[in-house]
Image (cartoon, rainbow, N blue to C red):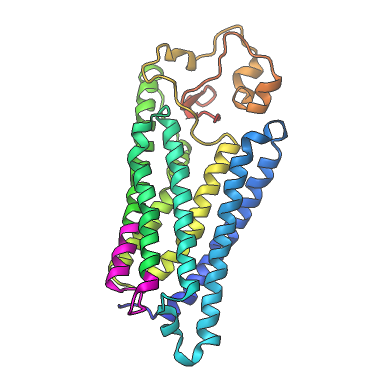
Amino acid sequence: MSGVALDKCSLLSLCIESIFWGLLLCLCMITVFLLLQKKSSIRKYVPRLVLVTLMFILCTMHVGLDFARVSNAFFEFSSQGPISYLENMTDTLYRFKYGVLFVQIFLGDLLIISRSFVLWNKNYYVVLGPTIMAVGTLVAAGGALHAMSDSPSNLTFDQQVQMWITASYTLALATKTTCLFLVMFRVRQIHSTITANVNRHVTVYTLMVVLVESGLAALLAAMILLITFVSRLNAHVIMCDVLSPITGLTVTAIVLGMTTKLSTPNPPASPTRPNWNRYSMPRSPVTPSRTKGWSDFDDDAAATSPKSPTMSRPESLYHLNQSTGTLNMAIVI
């Protein structure tokens, strides 16, 4: 092992993780507040509320376990040296912390897979591979935890333990990468179909929404974690601790986008659906408020506002902004 000492890495990772945890707390409060405002359709948003709350609880547990381990290393077990305690993977807190992290990774991957499933018209074959890899990540994580408890060396880089942990990190990275390409390819496919008729471009804002929803931040963190772990660098401790709040931030950001109608919506029922021109120019008779307003894309407003027979709910991935002449992400789930 090379690089910064393990005890210094543990202190630095705790500080960085606490900062990200604070950001997650603010984002969770905003998301929960907005979810509780959906009183007319609260049952629809209960799964999202449960997911955000569970992810925040797991992240808080991870931070608490890190704090307990650092406290034990520098105070309770200071006589034997903090590094020897931090390297001891048979410690209950050590294994529990890794278990919490892998549960977070699994839940985050499931959410991203579900969004890919929706974008691909609920095609089970498309998400079959990522789902198998996500389950494989959880199985490999279980093998790693079992190997930790039975390892005779008590070291993180024990050969058997490293094999299981590397497999879990690799499968998690493969799952996130596959979902990223699935989302990007599907967005590009639908965009090409639409722009062939309306001759418009996608805004940078749309691209940012897609990257957030595809879990790019968690993907990059998982990639750095895998590289540092395989290289046997103590910096993997920092990335391992930071990955927990980043996963929570990714999941919460996706749920927030879905709640505020800023995420990618359901695509058309058929990729070859004819008459795309109905998205390029509203047809009369349409009132100005329904032409420029977003009430058509709001589930709560749709329940109380009358629908024009010539204006069906748009299902396209994009919406034409007539004032700017650009295609924006349609604000609809």
Q: Is residue 163 left or right of residue 47?
A: left
- Is residue 92 at all visible to an observer of this figure? yes
Q: Indicate left or right for 204 with 253 as reference.
A: left
Q: Is residue 235 visible?
A: no
Question: How many numbered marks are there?
Answer: 0
The quadrant of the picture occupied by the N terminus is bottom left
Q: Point out the residue furthest to the bottom here.
A: 79
Position of 272 relative to 258 (above/below):
above
Reply yes or no: does residue 328 show up in magenta.
no
- At x 63% / y 55%, what residue is drawn? 26
User: Is 314 left or right of 223, judged from the image as shown?
Assistant: right
Quadrant of the image occupied by residue 331: top right
- Residue 75 x %, y %: 55, 86
Q: Main secondary structure of the magenta part?
A: helix
Q: Relative to residue 7, is residue 35 depicted above or below?
A: above
Residue 139 in the image: state x and y as whole percent: 37, 55
Is 78 above or below relative to 170?
A: below
Q: What residue is shown at x 66% (from left), y 41% (from top)? A: 35
The residue under the point 38% across, 71% down is 148
Towards the viewer: 127 or 24: 127
Q: Quadrant of residue 186?
A: top left
First to last magenta residue range: 148-168
Q: Is residue 270 left or right of residue 332?
A: left
Quarter occupied by residue 187: top left
Location of residue 263 with respect to 144 vertically, above or below: above
Can you give x and y, in whole percent of width and height, for residue 209 in the image?
Answer: 48, 40
The residue nearer to you, when weighing 289 against 96, is: 96
- The residue located at (68%, 22%) in the rendering is 303
Question: In the image, residue 126 lies at what x, y percent?
Answer: 34, 34
Q: Nearer the viewer, residue 165 or 4?
A: 165
